[in-house]
């Protein structure tokens, strides 16, 4: 969460000349704001919607797909990701605090320490799936995106 997935993903997609799909935005377009889904129907329902959105996005062919930070919690999603290139983006709790001051993120409602707890719980899943890892804490988005594109071109072209 708050690692810059959407900004970096859009730039990477543009540079690679492939579509960009943000699964959170796909869910919002079809079902309304994520905060409302969590409040009205609960996290398990949201995770079902997320699993379906990820499966659809990955089935569309070559694209840059930005997943919500919790998408990896679903075993079926993890299995689908095993056959793809996964770029893991991480950041620090300090960077998250500055990025999410005014953001509506249901899992961070308990405060900034919630991010660290969630990240620590999910990190083994992120690490197990990642083809490569980039820290987004301090470097400019454009520089990170350029490095990702260079890596992808070296390993996939």
Image (tube, helix red, strand yellow):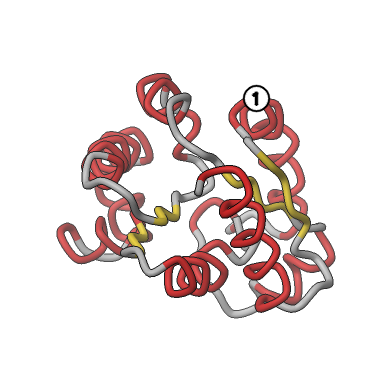
Of residues 57 and 104, the one nearer the viewer is 57
| Tally of marks | 1
The residue indicated by pointer 1 is 128
- Residue at 41% x, 20% y is 79
Q: Quadrant of residue 86?
A: top right
Residue 73 x/y as whole percent: 49, 29
Question: As drawn, is 86 to the left or to the right of 63?
Answer: right
Question: As drawn, is 129 to the left or to the right of 68?
Answer: right
Q: Quadrant of residue 33?
A: bottom left
Of residues 131 and 54, the one nearer the viewer is 131
Of residues 5 and 2, the one nearer the viewer is 5
- In the rendered image, which quarter contains the N terminus? bottom right
Question: As drawn, is 105 to the left or to the right of 87?
Answer: left
- Residue at 22% x, 47% y is 60
Find the residue positioned furthest to the front: 157
Question: As drawn, is 8 to the left or to the right of 81?
Answer: right
- Residue at 25% x, 41% y is 49
Residue 100 x/y as whole percent: 64, 72
Look at the picture and state if 30 lies above or below 74. Answer: below
Residue 120 x/y as whole percent: 75, 36
Q: Secondary structure at mark 1?
A: helix
Q: Residues within 10 Å of mark 1 (few under 14, many from 20)?
A: few
Look at the picture and state if 72 lies above or below 150. Answer: above
Of residues 14 and 100, the one nearer the viewer is 14
- Residue at 68% x, 42% y is 132
Look at the picture and state if 97 lies above or below 77. Answer: below
Residue 7 x/y as whole percent: 53, 73
Look at the picture and state if 97 lies above or below 85. Answer: below
Find the residue positioned furthest to the left: 30
């Amino acid at each position: 969460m708050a690692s810059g997935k959407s900004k970096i993903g859009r730039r990477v997609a543009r540079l690679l000349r492939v579509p960009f799909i943000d699964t959170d935005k796909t869910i919002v377009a079809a079902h309304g704001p994520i905060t409302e889904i969590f409040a009205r129907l609960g996290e398990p329902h949201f995770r079902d919607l997320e699993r379906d959105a990820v499966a659809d996005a990955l089935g569309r062919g070559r694209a840059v797909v930005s997943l919500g930070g919790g998408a990896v919690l679903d075993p079926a999603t993890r299995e689908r990701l095993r056959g793809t290139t996964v770029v893991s983006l991480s950041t620090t709790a300090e960077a998250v605090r500055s990025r999410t001051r005014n953001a509506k993120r249901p899992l961070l409602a308990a405060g900034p320490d919630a991010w660290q707890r969630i990240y620590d719980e999910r990190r083994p899943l992120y690490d197990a799936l990642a083809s490569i890892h980039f820290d987004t804490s301090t470097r400019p988005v454009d520089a990170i995106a350029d490095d990702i594109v260079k890596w992808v071109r070296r390993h996939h072209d």
